[in-house]
Amino acid sequence: MSKSRSNTAPLSHLQSFLDDTRGQITIGEIPPIRRAALAAQGKKVRVALVGRDGEAVAQLLERLDAALGKAIADDAVIDEVLPEIKRRRPG
């Protein structure tokens, strides 16, 4: 990640991710989840968040930014989507 941008700027982790990688940010429906936000590099998902009830898109983007910063710092994956899909499956 580029060190030239301040990490205190709004959505700085998202900005760095898009500037420094060939990554994508996606917001939309992943059935049965009505709203989700993903940050991925190619087929590798770094962060996948489930939108909360009543959460504005701006709030979801702020959570995505914070989670992406943590995922990059910890070299980890943060995935709320897959567990939620599994939880909702009839079984």
Image: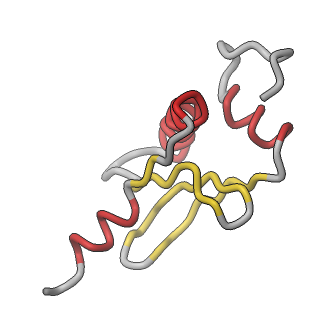
In the image, residue 15 lies at what x, y percent?
Answer: 76, 34
Residue at horizontal 84%, vertical 38%?
A: 20
In the rendered image, the residue lying farthest to the front is 75
Q: How many marks?
A: 0
Q: What's the image's color scheme?
A: secondary structure
- The reply, left or right, for residue 26 in relation to residue 88 is right
Quarter that holds the C terminus: bottom left
The reply, left or right, for residue 89 in relation to residue 60 is left
Q: Is residue 7 above or below residue 45?
A: above
Residue at x 70%, y 17% (from the top left corner): 9
Question: Is 13 drawn above or below residue 84 in the view shown?
Answer: above
In x, y percent, where is residue 79? 42, 54
> Which quarter shows the N terminus?
top right
Residues 10 and 65: in front is 65
Residue drawn at x 59%, y 58% is: 45
Q: Looking at the picture, how far across and down is residue 39, in whole percent?
A: 62, 52
On screen, residue 87 above or below 41: below
Residue 65, above or below 89:
above
**43 and 35: which one is in front?**
43
